[in-house]
Image (spheres, rainbow, N blue to C red):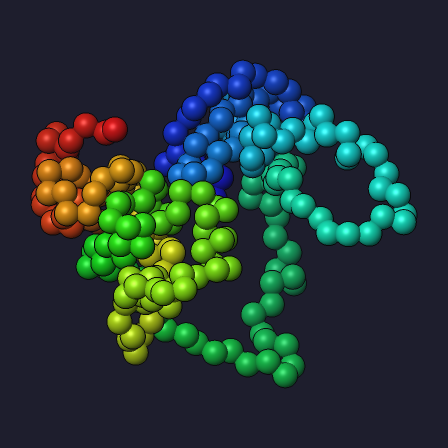
Amino acid sequence: MLESWLAHGKVTQQLGAREIQGRKATGLRISFGDRQADIWIDLQTRQIVRALEPTTAVYDPDNDRALRTPVPKNVRGGMALKGGEWTDIIYEPPADGVKFVLQPPEGYKVEHIKSRLPTEKDLIEWLEVFAQVRGGTFCDNEGSPFSKSEEAQARLKSPPANPSKWDEIFDRGYIQKEDVPLYGSGYSVVVVFRSRIAEEGTWHYQGKDVKLGDAQTPICWYRLPGATAYRIVYGNLDVKDVEEKNLPAKR
């Protein structure tokens, strides 16, 4: 996941160099959709040695007084997640085969569930669903029709009182019931298409503020495996082939 951030995210800030666990590392602040993280990379091996989400601009665990302050025993109540930290990352660790057992425990059985990966048709359909749920404007990023995670949580907890046809499609997670369900329904169809179908490194999304029906403005493009031309999707959901040298400017 962290390597995907580096491959497809946008560097918004250079954090300089520092020593982490005895290794010289350089830090990058990465923006990936509506998320941000600070990722530190070993200068010699190019391996990730530490990652923080959110960034230290939001929460800095190295300077959190609460981490060094014992919680009184009589305190009771809920907990709030401040952030996540990946550290002590080990690449290619030796694996003990005894710990990897594929035989189901007694009393359990294996159930094989079939699913299919999304096609370009699924991509177009869900781009339209997302735009319709947002009132006719495409998403800020390809991951969700909601620009902030709080909006998504609020939508899940309190669905519309009078849902439209598009709300109903979005909430049930599929457009048309199939014998073989779609892998990555609802929220994740577009993300699965980006990561599993489009050729690696060719996907680009820029649908923010584009109106559904805009035939002049591209919202995303990608190249399918084995193809030479890119596929551009416009705001009216038309799809056209174009050579890489003729791709529109990114915005």
Which quarter of the figure has residue 25?
top right
Q: Nearer the viewer, residue 21 or 149?
A: 149
Whole-percent x, y for residue 9 in the image: 39, 34
Whole-percent x, y for residue 88 in the image: 65, 37
Q: Is residue 108 left or right of residue 69?
A: left
User: What residue sits 48% from the left and 19% below the top?
Assistant: 14
Taking the view exactly as shown, the residue that stands out farthest to the right is 73
Taking the view exactly as shown, the residue that stands out farthest to the front is 162
Q: Is residue 195 left or right of residue 42?
A: left
Taking the view exactly as shown, the residue that stands out farthest to the bottom is 107
**Residue 49 seen from this side:** no
Q: Is residue 124 left or right of residue 193?
A: left
Establish if 103 lies above or below 199.
Answer: below
Which quarter of the figure has residue 65?
top right
Q: Nearer the viewer, residue 114 or 36?
A: 36
Whole-percent x, y for residue 221 in the image: 21, 41
Q: Nearer the viewer, residue 24 or 75?
A: 75
User: What residue sits 61% from the left and 40% below the top?
Assistant: 84
Taking the view exactly as shown, the residue that stands out farthest to the top is 16
User: What residue sits 65% from the left and 63% below the top?
Assistant: 98
Q: How many numbered circles are shown?
A: 0
Establish if 56 lies above or below 125.
Answer: above
**Residue 251 seen from this side:** yes
User: What residue sits 50% from the left and 53% below the top?
Assistant: 153
Image quarter (top left, top right, bottom left or bottom right) of the C terminus: top left
Establish if 212 lies above or below 245.
Answer: below
Whole-percent x, y for residue 188 in the image: 37, 55
Q: Is residue 144 left or right of residue 209?
A: right
